[in-house]
Image: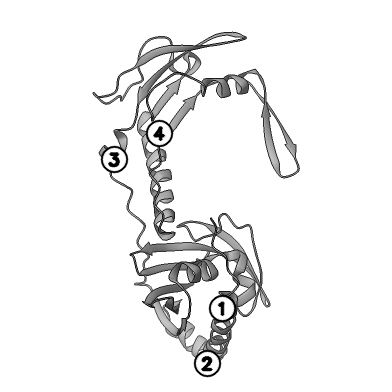
């Protein structure tokens, strides 16, 4: 159980750090974890889900503790028991006891420092995008008079996709404004709809790469952004198709020419869109 907690903590921190690097604004995050068990009820207000109950109030009150550590894991007796520390503790972890005093009475808890976890855990590797089973069938490129971050937001944010990519009417069920590995959404096209997911992402200073793959893994679109000068960025879009002679021949004969025309129009639309994009604060 404790190792599982470590794994989820690391996965969260790794994804957040990748996003901040893309915005060129890495943040030194700290983490405080409150673990409490009890009863609650839920209700919905418009698009928000709310929790109510005595134990929800207790969880909020526990945040107002006097622990001097910046990073800790706090656990109440209903979860941790009265005395013994959880199995799997590292030697440097010390299981301390304390309590907070509220109008309803005393709330006891245990806690331990977790800051050293950042130094001991190795980030989970970013999944490698497998191209061995696919063939590049077309490639288009255009240079834009804008910085790489602005172009990344314009091209990568699905909320903008229908404004520049020809054939796309809407994009629904968006998990996040920017690509993240595993993120899924539904793309409504003029000739139908289909689910796609973000299959890769990489950032290296003056270059950003990300890809999108359809749910059946038959096609993949690879986006490469390269800084070419002061407020000059080149975008290259490569389209890959699952290998198979009959499939490739059918694509070349029936779709390739039309798709190239669409992509060139899309890149032109994107040139107008980047003039309007405002980066989030």
Query: Where does the image place residue 52, in percent across and percent down from the top left?
Result: 68, 25
How packed mark 1 is, by other alpha carbons closer than 10 Å (few <14, some 14-19, many 20 or more), is many
Q: Which residue is label 3 attached to? A: 121
- Identified at 61% across, 23% down, the residue is 56
Q: Which residue is label 4 attached to? A: 5
Query: Where does the image place residue 238, in percent across and percent down from the top left?
Result: 44, 79
- Identified at 55% across, 64% down, the residue is 157
Which mark identifies residue 270?
A: 1
Mark 3 or 2, closer to the camera: 3
Distance between the Cα atoms at labels 1 and 4? 42 Å
Q: Which residue is label 2 attached to? A: 253
Distance between the Cα atoms at labels 4 and 2? 52 Å
Q: Is residue 262 left or right of residue 243?
A: right
* First in sequence: mark 1 vs mark 3: 3
Direction right: furthest residue: 46
How packed mark 2 is, by other alpha carbons closer than 10 Å (few <14, some 14-19, many 20 or more), is few
* Quadrant location of the N terminus in the rendered image: top left
Q: Are marks 3 and 4 in contact (CB under 8 Å)?
A: no
């Amino acid at each position: 159980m404790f190792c599982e907690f470590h794994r989820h903590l690391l996965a969260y921190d790794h994804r957040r750090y990748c996003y901040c690097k893309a915005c060129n604004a890495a943040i030194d995050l700290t983490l405080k974890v409150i673990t409490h068990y009890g009863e609650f009820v839920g209700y919905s207000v418009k698009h928000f889900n709310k929790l109510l109950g005595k134990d929800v109030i207790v969880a909020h009150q526990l945040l107002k503790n006097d622990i001097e550590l910046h990073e800790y894991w706090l656990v109440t007796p209903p979860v941790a028991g009265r005395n013994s520390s959880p199995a799997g503790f590292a030697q440097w972890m010390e299981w301390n006891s304390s309590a907070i005093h509220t109008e309803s009475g005393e709330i006891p808890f245990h806690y331990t420092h977790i800051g050293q976890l950042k130094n001991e855990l190795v980030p989970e590797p970013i999944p490698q995008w497998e191209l061995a089973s696919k063939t590049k069938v077309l490639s288009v490129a255009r240079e834009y008079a804008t910085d790489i971050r602005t172009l990344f937001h314009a091209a990568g944010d699905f909320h903008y996709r229908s404004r520049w990519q020809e054939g796309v009417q809407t994009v629904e069920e968006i998990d996040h404004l920017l690509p993240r590995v595993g993120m899924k959404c539904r793309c409504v096209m003029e000739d139908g709809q289909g689910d796609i997911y973000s299959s890769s992402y990489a950032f290296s200073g003056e270059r950003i790469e990300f890809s999108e793959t359809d749910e059946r893994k038959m096609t993949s679109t690879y986006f490469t952004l390269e800084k070419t000068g002061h407020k000059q960025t080149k975008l290259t879009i490569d389209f890959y198709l699952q290998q198979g002679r009959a499939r490739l021949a059918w694509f070349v004969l029936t779709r390739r020419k039309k798709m190239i025309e669409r992509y060139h129009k899309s890149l032109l639309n994107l040139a107008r869109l980047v003039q309007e994009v405002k980066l989030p604060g």
